[in-house]
């Protein structure tokens, strides 16, 4: 039984072999592109998806900001949110010193002291 299957595979392989110098079929194309597709899939899973998740989490964090939250900006300024507009926040960085910063400039929310 095994010899019949092996014989059929050899016959099938001989019958479908391309002449020397002839371009390969679609299967040859898939075999040659396989490693590149595998590398792209790994890059997507290791680099692109985590970055998308971080961006989504940051966007949600920025939209949830409200008065009283302690924040740190991308420039390193620490302050307390005193007011919020659609695209900007008012943060108090010192006694009676308020700055208007873009929501996108908020790096993280820190714990209240």
Image (cartoon, helix red, strand yellow):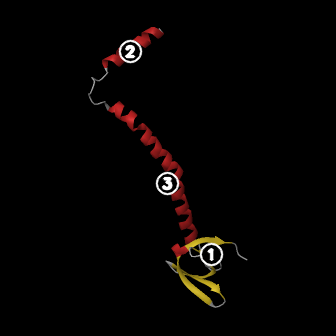
Mark earlier in primary sequence (1, 3)? 3
Camera-nearest label, 2 or 1: 2
The kind of secondary structure element at disc 3 is: helix
Is 38 above or below relative to 13?
below
Q: In the figure, is residue 7 to the left or right of 63?
A: left
Residue at 63% x, 71% y is 109
The kind of secondary structure element at disc 1 is: strand
Which x, y percent locates residue 32? Answer: 38, 35
Residue at 56% x, 85% y is 99
Mark earlier in primary sequence (2, 3)? 2
Q: Name the residue under label 2.
A: 10
Q: Count residues near mark 2 (Cα–Cα under 10 Å), then give few for <14, some for 14-19, many for 20+.
A: few
Q: Mark 1 points at which residue?
A: 71
Which x, y percent locates residue 29? Answer: 35, 35
Which label is found at residue 104? none
Instruction: Calculate the distance from the C-alpha at mark 1 to the C-alpha at mark 3.
Output: 27 Å
- Determine the residue located farthest toward the right in the rendered image: 113
Mark earlier in primary sequence (2, 1)? 2
Q: Count residues near mark 1 (Cα–Cα under 10 Å), then give few for <14, some for 14-19, many for 20+.
A: many
| Residue 76 sits in quarter | bottom right
The kind of secondary structure element at disc 2 is: helix
């Amino acid at each position: 039984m095994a010899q019949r299957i092996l014989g059929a595979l050899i016959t099938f392989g001989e019958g479908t072999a391309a002449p020397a110098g002839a371009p390969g079929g679609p299967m040859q194309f898939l075999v040659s592109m396989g490693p590149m597709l595998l590398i792209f899939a790994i890059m997507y899973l290791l680099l692109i998806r985590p970055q998308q998740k971080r961006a989504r989490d940051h966007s949600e964090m920025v939209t949830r900001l409200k008065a009283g939250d302690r924040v740190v900006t991308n420039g390193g300024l620490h302050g307390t949110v005193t007011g919020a507009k659609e695209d900007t926040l008012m943060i108090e960085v010192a006694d009676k010193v308020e700055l208007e910063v873009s929501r996108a400039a908020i790096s993280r929310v820190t714990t209240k002291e």
